Image: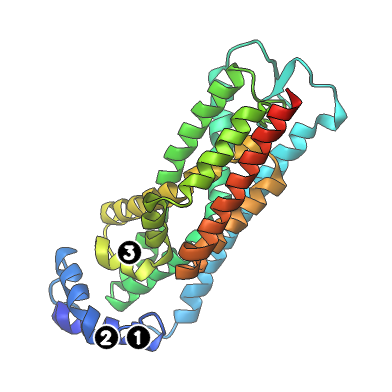
Amino acid sequence: MQEPRQVADRIAQRLRDAGQLKEEPHQVAAGIAQKLREAGYGPVISNPVPTSRWWDRFIISLALILLTAVAWAYLLWLRADMDMGGMDMRGFRIIPSGMGYMMPTHTPWQAIEFAFVFAMWTVMMVGMMTPSAAPMIFMYYRMGRLTETRGTLFAATAWFVAGYFLAWTAFALLATLAQWVLERTGVLDTAMANTNEILGAFVFLVAGSYQWTRAKELCLVECQKPFEFLMRHGCFRHDARGSVVLGLRHGAYCVGCCWLLMALLFVGGVMNLLWIVLLALFISLEKVTSSFGRRFVAPAAGAVLNVAGTWMLMLTAGLH
């Protein structure tokens, strides 16, 4: 049996050996020990590290790949359904169900339509955010292994992922409500893309300006540094509730980092797969580039979005 400080020293050293720390192990060991105590760990059993580490990583990787693949397969199915074989869809809107449901544009939304749109947004968030969340998920599992709670590792990691996507599910609900409002005001076409140039320019300008804000930077830091996030917010939690809460907190930071980028979907088309892929790739780039992403990638993207928004306003003014 070992006390939290002894386990903390071992965790810090192993993370340093794995290249996860730039500081000396003793500089972070005290913080790790405190987080372990706050998480309810007293003496911790110091069994040898399991030799199946590669197998654990394989299982988690396979699960994340399957989750992403299923989400994208669903989106492709919806996209194929919305094409409707080149039919003239004027006067109708397509319900993204994959079953060819249509409804006259002047009729209010039904509960089933709201449910299908909400499901579309939820699955879209899973497909877009799973790859960029993978480093955090692997770090959470690794911290669990280092604290030797092997009996709950996969379950706790699954609960953490559930908490993470609970935050994005809440965002999906807000996006569904926003789509309902935009659709009722007549600014979305049958492809669920914005038709109002001024509104589109405004979204570009707001999203671009947000890239330069302190809020964006703070949220991006929490997304870019999984180890530091866990040290600040509670380390590994072996219970379901603690894992869900920690995942929800991390998901909230990710929503805070990316919510205005997601709003660009209304400009390019909610079901424009190329637009979705480009946004997902950019979000992943922002997160994996660490300090370079904060100092250069995010501001540069903000500049591009502001230029695009300004150009759209100028074009609109010229047309009028």
Q: Which mark is residue 49?
A: none
Of the pair 272 and 5, the residue shown nearer to us: 272
Residue located at (67% from left, 40% from top): 311
Disc 3 and disc 2: Cα gap in Å?
Answer: 17 Å
Q: Mark 2 and 1 residues: CB-CB less than 8 Å, in contact?
A: yes
Lower sequence index among marks 1 and 3 = 1
Provide the residue designation for mark 1: 16
* Nearest the eye: 171 or 204: 204
- How far apart, in angstroms, are the residues tagged by discs 2 and 1? 7 Å
Q: Position of residue 137 (x, y in %)?
A: 43, 64
Tell me where residue 153 sits by quadrant. Answer: bottom left
Nearer-N-terminus badge (2/1): 1
Label 1 SS: helix
Distance from disc 1 to disc 3, alpha carbons, whole Å, reads 17 Å
Mark 2 nearby-residue class (10 Å; few <14, some 14–19, many ≥20): some
* Residue drawn at point x = 56 percent, y = 63 percent: 285
* Amino acid residing under circle 1: Arg
Relative to 284, is 197 above or below?
above
Q: Quadrant of residue 138?
A: bottom left
Reading the image, the residue beneath label 3 is: 229
Disc 3 residue crowd, few under 14, some 14–19, many 20+, Cα 10 Å: some
Element under disc 3: helix
* Amino acid type, residue under disc 2 in the picture: Pro
Name the residue rendered at 55%, 23% in the picture. 180
**Residue 25 percent coordinates (x, y):** 26, 86
Vertical comparison of 179 with 46: above or below: above
